Image: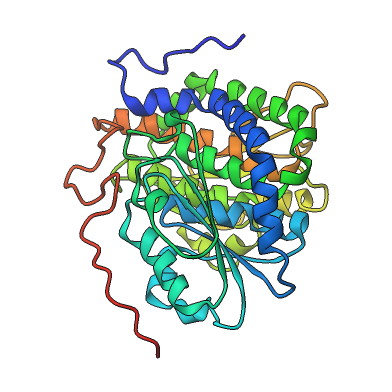
């Protein structure tokens, strides 16, 4: 049985516990959606009765990055045209994504649902689309998004209360909503996924039980960090760079890219103060490209340190450190890897924040970033 392990000897803070609690949270979310399956499937059947339906995965900030990780899962598992579009893009350029003649299933992710763009995206979609369905996945039953009124069909999934992080940085809320989204894409077969969920939870536990690994990496003298991931792990790389950057109040400048994309110019960011963190796929056709990227790091300026995260050992990789999540032949579907592969960046950000003298719950020294974005004005939508 998993025994909670303190990450630090300092007084406990929310972010620490919220990182540690994620594997238990994933189990609760799976059980919740098992129960709600009988309600979710009719809702989805109603929406997908339209032959030309578009599915749009949306959110702001970290919540938007969830869509980057699961867009492929929706396309493969539901066989519908699906795109990941942030609410911040919808609010300013809605007609790039909505058409009055095309029905839409808008799947909105939000921790609190109180960011101004969350409800604004719903309202604008209502104004443009002649037929729209709203599936809302949130962590706050009292949030503006969960409580928003609409005349269109709506289904709201409120995750367990512990998913509603109190710290600034989204941790359990991010991985929890990500898992919920994945399970929605496979809702018709959710009762067959218990073994996959057990493997996922075991991988999460293994990462959390290695605090010294991430503390040691955090103590390295790096000023930049690059996170690389492809396919469903591109969203993880995107969220990882934000997590480290916001938990260190921008002291560590972070970038993200795909393995192949990084070689087309962005690699110029690498210098002797750069940490490179590689998120490896478990797909055989992707791994050769990922190994080639490691070889390419020998060309030009060398990074300070390279870290790889992989399900299983990959022969021939020359890295400073390789973190594995599996000790046996267990195999997780690649689309579930993003749920646990976000934990290293969370822990790295947590320890780097402490090293820099910040409180990880409230790392912003100037107040420039907040748990819920402030100062965003929403203006009336005017058709162009």
In this rendering, does residue 231 appear at all?
no
Residue 195 image offset from top left, x and y in percent: 77, 27
Q: Is residue 15 left or right of residue 136?
A: left
In this rendering, does residue 215 appear at all?
yes
Residue drawn at (73%, 66%), measured in percent from left and top?
Answer: 49
Q: Nearer the viewer, residue 237 or 64?
A: 64
Residue drawn at (42%, 14%), measured in percent from left and top?
Answer: 6
Residue drawn at (48%, 38%), measured in percent from left and top?
Answer: 345
Q: Nearer the viewer, residue 90 or 241?
A: 90
As drawn, the residue found furthest toward the left would be 366
How many discs appear? 0
Q: Is 163 drawn above or below residue 50 in the view shown?
A: above
Q: Quadrant of residue 202?
A: top right
Q: Nearer the viewer, residue 147 or 246?
A: 147
Q: Is residue 250 left or right of residue 295?
A: left
Q: Is residue 100 left or right of residue 117?
A: right
Q: Nearer the viewer, residue 86 or 230?
A: 86
């Amino acid at each position: 049985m998993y025994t909670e392990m303190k990450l630090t000897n300092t007084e406990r803070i929310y972010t620490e516990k919220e990182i540690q609690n994620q594997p238990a949270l994933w189990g609760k979310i799976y059980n919740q959606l098992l129960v709600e399956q009988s309600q979710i499937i009719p809702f989805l059947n109603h929406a997908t009765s339209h032959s030309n339906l578009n599915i749009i995965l949306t959110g702001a900030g970290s919540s938007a990055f969830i869509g980057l990780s699961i867009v492929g899962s929706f396309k493969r598992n539901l066989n519908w045209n699906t795109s990941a579009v942030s609410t911040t893009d919808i609010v300013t350029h809605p007609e790039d994504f909505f058409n009055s003649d095309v029905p839409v299933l808008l799947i909105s992710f939000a921790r609190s649902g109180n960011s101004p763009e969350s409800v604004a995206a719903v309202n604008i979609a209502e104004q443009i689309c002649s037929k729209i369905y709203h599936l809302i996945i949130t962590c706050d039953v009292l949030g503006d998004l969960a409580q928003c009124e609409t005349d269109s069909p709506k289904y709201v999934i409120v995750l367990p209360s512990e998913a509603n992080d109190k710290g600034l940085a989204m941790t359990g809320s991010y991985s929890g909503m990500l898992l919920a989204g994945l399970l929605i894409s496979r809702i018709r077969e959710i009762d067959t996924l218990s073994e996959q969920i057990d493997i996922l939870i075991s991988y999460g536990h293994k990462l959390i039980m290695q605090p010294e690994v991430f503390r040691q990496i955090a103590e390295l003298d790096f000023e930049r960090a690059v996170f690389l991931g492809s396919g469903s792990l591109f969203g993880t790389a995107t969220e990882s760079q934000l997590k480290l950057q916001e938990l260190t109040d921008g002291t560590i400048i972070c970038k993200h890219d795909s393995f192949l994309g990084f070689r087309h110019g962005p690699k110029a960011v690498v210098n002797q103060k750069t940490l490179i963190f590689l998120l490896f796929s478990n797909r055989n056709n992707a791994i050769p490209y990922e190994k080639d990227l490691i070889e390419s790091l020998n060309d030009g300026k060398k990074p300070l340190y390279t870290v790889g995260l992989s399900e299983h050992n990959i022969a021939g990789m020359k890295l400073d450190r390789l973190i594995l999540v599996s000790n046996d032949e267990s195999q997780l579907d690649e689309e579930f890897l993003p749920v646990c592969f976000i934990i290293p960046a969370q822990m790295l950000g947590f320890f780097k924040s402490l090293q820099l003298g910040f409180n990880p719950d409230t790392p912003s020294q100037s107040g420039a970033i907040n748990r819920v974005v402030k100062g965003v004005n929403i203006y009336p939508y005017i058709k162009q």
